[in-house]
Amino acid sequence: MSQTDKDLPTLRPMREDDIDRVLEIIYDHDEDDAATAEQTYRDAGMADKFVLTQGKTILGTTGFNAVEDTDRTYWLSWTYLDDTYRGKGYGRLMMEGLFERLRARSARKIFLTTSDYQDPEEGDIYESARTFYTSLGFEEELRHKDFYAPGETMIYYGFRFPDNDSVKDTAAVDDEGRPVNAGAVLTGITEIPETRDAYGLEWRYTQDGTYFDERTVNKALAKAREWKARAVFASFPSDLSGIEGLMKPKGFTQHGRLRDFFEDGIDDCHWRYDFKLPKEGEDSRGNNQRGRNDQRGRDQRGRNDNRNRNDNRRRNDNRNDNRRRSDNRNDNRRH
Ligand SMILES: CC(C)(COP(=O)(O)OP(=O)(O)OC[C@H]1O[C@@H](n2cnc3c(N)ncnc32)[C@H](O)[C@@H]1OP(=O)(O)O)[C@@H](O)C(=O)NCCC(=O)NCCS
């Protein structure tokens, strides 16, 4: 029987009474994601989240989150199709519906992250997702090697919507309309969720061109060392000209960027610092440290776009928009 347009699944906004079914679909693939997703739906609601439906049946879910303080940049949120409907073109259909909505918002870029996690039984379980996104026009932009745990890479993909270039009207001014000369100060260092011992630097803009000094970086690294970090990650907009001179001498390396993340011509530059790892079973003083991480196990490997997006946001939270004006919108963790 041929499928008529009437039978074709359609994308509609997600509602409160869809939550249980959506969580079931996510849970089938990843229990951790389901738990995080539930928390997010309950706390932040379902704005910009969608379900693919055929009649009353929910086949899958997708959605997006606007990144504050950027020029129409978005992250893809949880994107899952019920197992029984995979490989039949419905994923593509679901993304077409999503892109239609993004185009209606004049979206400029959308990003997602995934991983190369090798499941001991099933192997590279995200390979098909990577092929899927590539087939939709996403391009790989950045890799964080050993991000979640040694051997597991986080991979960023970006998609550029044609015809939606940034309008360059962006002379930086503060609330009173005075010109702003942006700098940055570090505000903290926290463990990145879903990783094993990876930490992220947090920072916020200054409006008088001042930057953190090397002592603050030293302090952050000392804390990370004390906490037995494997690596410290940080990312800054490419137009913060003072960053390179501060990060490089401290041993950070810039290892990639998300192109045009903030607006056309302003990338998100990613830095990392890798600690020398002690030999297996020993800490840096040669003591046995088995057991410290045992309870975490392998099940906290992250690779879902939404979680990764959180990770990324943790480090970006404090970016106030002082290119156009500064209004202290700090809390963009909502998604
Ligand atoms: C990823 C997912 C949404 C794709 O949806 P889908 O309906 O299975 O994909 P489609 O049938 O629409 O396929 C579209 C394209 O994706 C690629 N693709 C899909 N499944 C694939 C597979 N198993 N192996 C290789 N490529 C695959 C193909 O390039 C395909 O192009 P084609 O139509 O020209 O053959 C779905 O498989 C899924 O939910 N997977 C599990 C959850 C997941 O991994 N989510 C992403 C988290 S990062």
Image: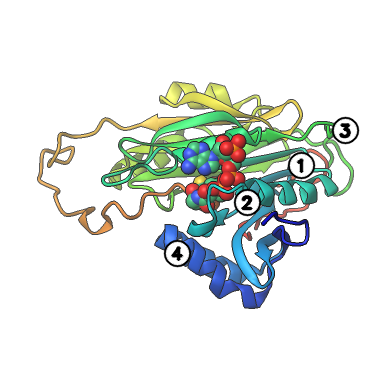
Q: Position of residue 301 (x, y in %)?
A: 37, 49
Q: Label 1 amino acid?
A: Asn
User: How much space separates mark 3 and mark 4, taking CA atoms?
Assistant: 41 Å
Q: Position of residue 299 (x, y in %)?
A: 32, 55
Residue lying farthest to the bottom in this orientation: 17
Q: Kindly identify the residue that appears in the image at 35 percent across and 54 percent down.
A: 300
Q: Which mark is residue 282?
A: none
Q: Kindly identify the residue that appears in the image at 55 percent across and 52 percent down.
A: 306
Q: Position of residue 101 (x, y in %)?
A: 79, 51
Q: Earlier in the sequence, mark 2 or mark 1?
A: 2
Q: Earlier in the sequence, mark 3 or mark 4?
A: 4
Structural crowding at the residue carrying mark 3, measured as other residues with C-alpha within 10 Å and reported as few (<14), some (14–19) or many (≥20): few
Q: Kindly identify the residue that appears in the image at 11 percent across and 38 percent down.
A: 286
User: What secondary structure is found at the residue carrying circle 4?
Assistant: helix
Q: Quadrant of ligand 1?
A: top right
Q: Which residue is mark 2?
A: 90
User: What secondary structure is found at the residue carrying circle 3?
Assistant: loop
Q: Label 3 amino acid?
A: Val
Q: Which residue is mark 1?
A: 322
Q: Which residue is mark 3?
A: 167
User: What secondary structure is found at the residue carrying circle 1?
Assistant: loop
User: How much space separates mark 2 and mark 4, taking CA atoms?
Assistant: 19 Å
> Can you tell me whether the CB of the residue at mark 4 lies under 8 Å from the nearest atom of ligand 1?
no
User: How much space separates mark 3 and mark 2, taking CA atoms?
Assistant: 35 Å
